[in-house]
Amino acid sequence: MCLKYAQYCPRDTAQGLYCRFIQTQLIMSDTESLFEDLLSLQRQKAVPPVSAWQPQRVGEIDIRIARDGTWYHAGGAIRRLGLVRLFASVMRRDSDGFCLVTPAEKLFIEVEDAPFMAIDMEVRGSDKSAEVLFTTNVEDYVLIDRQHPMRVDEVNEEPRPYIHVRDGLDALMTRAVYYRLVEAAITEGRELVIYSCGERFSLGRY
């Protein structure tokens, strides 16, 4: 049955209950399919081995990543997403700062907050069996687990939720994504928590 016709099913009849059951199953099926598609895309990505590169030539480049995730070069916003993704693929965070790295050189850049933004989220399962998958603004798909934890910092009494992507690089969740995460969370005592891949992550106490 097409979802758009489900609204016409009688509410308090067996037919109505069946319609709503079918609607729920279709939504769950769509979510499962999307979840697997995104994981497959991430597995197919060829990420350069930037953590292994130790170039001798070190310098700086006039690139800045603003708090909202916008990339700038020489004061102008970089509009080409493909170029942003290319730069992001060779970025890492060392003890002395954020940098773009190739086998030949290491160039430091300015990052105002986190280098990436988490702009979407999908949840598979529920409660302690849940899996939470985030999409970043540079098209990374990050499944939250022990190697990719999330945390919530407090800045000026406001929550700042982050997920770890790779190589010391984090993504800051947009407000809309964070609100969706809060809705998916469960309460344990006076603490709001989310589980993913068997790991427990705190969203804070109230």
Image (spheres, rainbow, N blue to C red):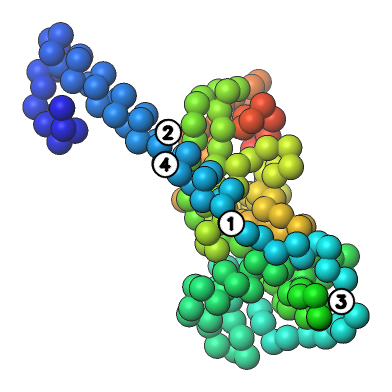
Residue 34, disc:
4
Query: Are discs 4 and 2 less than 8 Å apart at CB?
Result: yes
Residue 32, disc:
2
Name the residue carrying label 3: 55
Crowd band around label 3 with a 10 angstrom C-alpha radius: few (<14), some (14–19), many (20+): few
Q: Callout 1, which amino acid? A: Lys
Where does residue 169 sit, x and y in percent of width and height? 72, 59
Look at the picture and state if 17 lies above or below 40.
above
> Relative to residue 195, is residue 41 drawn left or right?
left
First of labels 1, 3 by sequence position: 1
Name the residue carrying label 1: 45
Gap in Å between the C-alphas at discs 2 and 3?
43 Å
> Relative to residue 61, is residue 4 drawn left or right?
left
- Give the image quarter of residue 172: bottom right
Q: Quadrant of the N terminus?
A: top left
Q: Nearer the viewer, mark 4 or mark 1?
A: 1
> Relative to residue 104, is residue 138 drawn left or right?
left
What residue sits 69% from the left and 50% below the top?
164
